[in-house]
Amino acid sequence: MIEKNFEYYAFISYSHKDEKWGKWLQDNIEKFKVSADVREKNINIPKYIRPVFRDKTDVVPGMHVKKNLTRELSNSRYLIVICSPRSAKSPYVNHEVEEFKKLGGENRIIPFIIEGTPSNSNPEKECYCPALKGDSGQYIMGVSIQEMSAEKGSKRRGTKTALLKVIAAILNIRFDHLEQRNERIQRRKRVQLSLSLISLFLVALFIWSSFFRVTTKYYADYVDRWGIPEGVVKINKSKLARSKNYYKFKYKRKKLLSVIAVNSSGKYYNEIHEELSNRPAKQKFDYSQNSGDLQKIYFLDMNDRIIFVSSSSFGRYEEVDFKNSQGKDAVLPTVISGVTTNFFTTNYLNAKSKINHFSHSRNSNGEIMETRFKYGGLEYIGDGNGIYGKRYKRDDLGRIIEIKYFDVNGDFHCSKQGVAGKRYQYDNYGHIKVVEYIGIDGNLTLNSQNWAKSIEEFDEWGNVVKRSYYDTKGELSLISKGYSSWNKTYNQVGDIELVTYCGMKSELTLNEYNFAGVFKEYDEIGNSTKVVYLGVDGKPILNMHGFAGFVREFDGNKNPLAVSYFGTNYEPVLNNYGFAKYERKYDDRWNLIEARLFGLDGKLILANNGYAFWKCKYDDRGNELERLYYGVDGNPIVIKNGYSGLSRRYDERGNQVEQSYIGINKELVINKDGYSGIKSTYDIMGNELSKEYYGLERERVLIKGDFAFSKSTYDELGNHLEKTYYGLNGERVSMNGDYSVWRSKYDDQGNEIEKSFFDVDLKPTLFENKYSIVRKTFDNNRNLIEEKYYDEYNQLINGDK
């Protein structure tokens, strides 16, 4: 019988690494409906077994946590322990079992075994924590999914039987009564289903042809509902021919097959709004053949290469894992909360985040309201900006209208640039019209590009024709790229024909790359085949790289095959890197494997770096393993940096752990900086812990006579706390005769508030003969408001600020 003096029917104890099973068990127990005839035969049996308590924390309990858990345990009729080799080692699980025993519940413990066996001689397969065994070595009998699966002939039936055993134990009734009743219900459902199928058979024949037909729809935007994009603001056919970009949805069997960002020609288009750069070029969806639930999402580039694969254990896409095409942990970008973050990057040399899991909280419509970043064992982890997750507000269509960042504790938090979130407004075409960056106080704040708000204007086809940038006061702002606004005009098929950059008074102005405008021509599928850079007078101008424009050739997948540069009179010119044209080659996985450089005469040329072409090799993950340089005669050549090639190694997480410099015969050589290679190690978050330089015999060597290797330490948030430089024999050495060690301190927002320098004896020393300590003060939006310098005696230098 269920006693009414308990608040919970059961308390579920589990290791955080088995969280998915905790959620599954709680959901299925609470959803289980006890049949009427069982309730009639057993007085006080409830219709539903609710509530069931599941603790969501997984830290070593402090005293206040223990007190709270004791209260919840004392209010629980049963204790269900999810048993696995992971929970067997969890002091947290062991504590809960011991506490439940103290409360007199030793005979009300239900072990639910998902992996391993009790009292196994192999510690790695032991699934019972010490408290479940007892001092005498006797252990409590449990319910094993593995045993039930073997008995029933399938894991699905075994898992269901194990669940029924747990429910029978909670209700204190015989399992066979519950199982027999459940079988009768299932048989009745199968009969009813068979009759329904027969009645629907003729209708199914009629709609069969349309059911299997692939249908296509076009939308300006989409929202994520339970992991599946749902189109927002449908685009009619009359606008497709002149709309610059939109999303192409393909359906079959009423299931979404793919979503592709396309241009007016229906071809892949990657120049979407910066705020949407975390969306991939293509998405393909894989569903379970049995349940029809979403199983995996494949994120692809324009060459159909798999960048990431996401999956969710229970089909609702609340807990999402990211893998690469080989099924290994994906390497996500270090910063996924930046201004122009490219989430779906294929650049493995730059992407070093340890985030490989998203934990989504969704509303009743399946829309994501909160996302937490996790790694490996599902511990919380931040990106390179110190952001641990995002919370969202949405409009009636489900679109995001506000994003707020939070820290490891879930508190509102600023990025290292002082940005705590964003706000969006949309136009009638479904496009983002207004973007606002907000600080910790909820007011406008400047982002890393020196603007707080942008406003866009659109033409009748939904193409953006103007964007203006504003400061925190709502006044026009000159951003870090050198302009205050830009304007775009389009051709008859929606391709951008002209872009102009304007200053504070709407006058044409040179941007950071030394041009005021860009004119483009296209081929029939929307490839930009000719680009001309213009000055404030509207005439061709040399940009900062030494050319006024270029013409391009593409393959069928929009990959550039050749680029030729020209000057202000459209004559061929050498760019600032010493070549007039380059040609590219790709392998069958679309990795760039060769680049050739040509001069004004159309022949191979030794460019400024001392080579005419290079060739690359890659591993299965797309990491560059080797790059070799060649001269105009096709033979290996030693370039100006003193080597003929590079060889690289990576760890399982995609971190580059070694780079070697090799000669014409692939032997180790000394580069111009005096070493043959570098070895690095990393912590679990991807922070570089050590870097060591070696010579021809892989022995340690000094770099420019100063140091041979360095070591770093970081706090749990990834803040760089200390760096020490060492000599050949592991002794501390001075950098440029200056300092040997630096140490930093940070505030709760992740701001570096102090940096100090020490000599080889760890005594304070001056940095560049200027100061020994610098202390900084920041406001709530992480803006630097004060900087003070101190000497080696901790005395303020000349009252300097």
Image: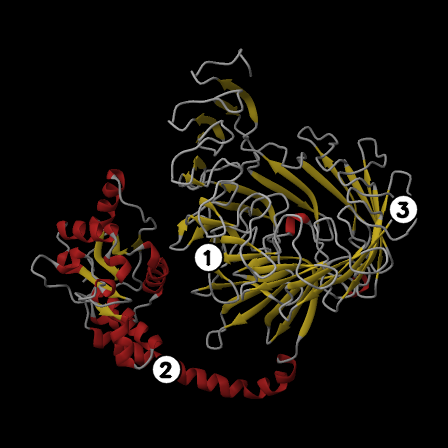
Among numbered discs 3 and 1, the one appearing first in the sequence: 3
**Tag nearer the camera, 2 or 3:** 3
Does any portion of residue 497 appear in the rendered image? Answer: no
Nearest the viewer among 25 and 273 is: 273
Compared across the picture, whether 5 is left or right of 717 comes to left
Nearest the viewer among 591 and 116 is: 591
Label 2 is placed on what type of residue?
Arg
Give SS at disc 3: loop
Q: Which mark is residue 651?
A: 1
- Gap in angstroms between the C-alphas marked 1 and 2: 55 Å
Examine the rendered structure and indicate whether residue 718 appears above or below residue 310.
above
**Label 2 close to label 3 by CB (< 8 Å):** no
Displayed quadrant of residue 129: bottom left
Q: Which mark is residue 725?
A: none
Q: Which mark is residue 188?
A: 2
Q: Position of residue 696 (x, y in %)?
A: 50, 52
Among numbered discs 1 and 2, the one appearing first in the sequence: 2
Displayed quadrant of residue 511: top right
The residue under the point 68% across, 63% down is 635
Label 1 is placed on what type of residue?
Asp
Examine the rendered structure and indicate whether residue 768 appears above or below residue 53.
above
Residue under label 3: 568
Give SS at disc 1: loop
